[in-house]
Amino acid sequence: MEIDVPPVELDPGFAARFGEHNRRPACQLYLISPATLYDGFADDLVAALDVGSVAAFQLRLKGIDDHAIARAAEPLQRICADREVAFIINDSVGLAKRLGADGVHLGQEDGDAREARSILGPSVQIGVTCHDSRHLAMEAGEHGADYVAFGAFFETATKETTHRPDPSILSWWTALFELPCVAIGGITADNAAPLVAAGADFLAVSGAIWNGAGGPAAAVRAFEMVLRK
């Protein structure tokens, strides 16, 4: 049974009280694939990664088995490796191990970070979805996660969501913990600034990159304008 920290509203200026010593690296992008890959997606991934500011790419495919995902992953994993971008598998520890992926991202129903670590070893990055829960985030850190993800911050068509955290949870987390945090859920270049200002280490984005009228490279450049402010 989950026992969360009581829902007390966080002070948006909480982190500022800790002073300048808590500086962290600049926020970067964490791209997530569409649920179904389209023709030419590999070329779009190259275009997005070649712009810069992208730290990681997560392959999140739905409705196909692990063998099909593994086939789809091969060229994308090579593209990421050539550009020193972390290649992350969504949900499946077994598939991450099979592919030799740089990391795995686990939802709350996808397994425990401790078990994932025992299977994948010390060098693989493990991320955990924590919704709007401070308790789940602290628990993930205690269990050996390499990053925690909060969201969805905005409405998103990528997946059904029921949690809507306030950006102040990012300020709270980064003021108290060194572990990186990822903001996720409906993030666009137009609404990302408050999340960056609140302390997100990474912005996880999907539709805003792949569905933009100007193409992935233009979308990444639009985010770069926000990240550089």
Image (cartoon, helix red, strand yellow):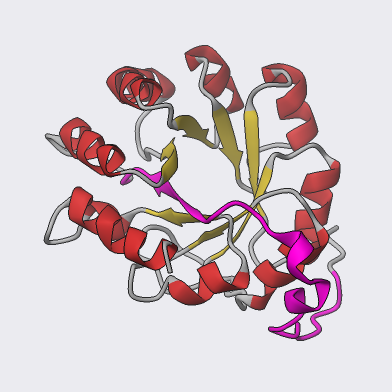
Relative depth, front residue between 220 and 22: 22
Q: Is residue 187 visible?
A: no
101 lies left or right of 188: right
| Quadrant location of the C terminus in the rendered image | bottom left
Q: Quadrant of residue 18?
A: bottom right
Relative depth, front residue between 165 and 175: 175
Q: Position of residue 131 (x, y in %)?
A: 64, 62
154 lies left or right of 45: right
Q: Is residue 71 visible?
A: yes
Residue at image point 55% right, 73% down: 197
Q: Quadrant of residue 45?
A: top left
In the rendered structure, which segment of residues is drawn in magenta?
A: 5-34
**Whether residue 114 is situated above or below residue 212 in the rendered picture:** above
Residue extending farthest to the front is: 20
| Quadrant location of the N terminus in the rendered image | bottom right
**Whether residue 134 is situated above or below residue 96 in the rendered picture:** below
Residue at image point 72% right, 18% down: 121
Q: Main secondary structure of the magenta part?
A: loop
| Membership of 12 in magenta stretch | yes
Q: Position of residue 11 (x, y in %)?
A: 75, 85
| Membership of 229 in magenta stretch | no
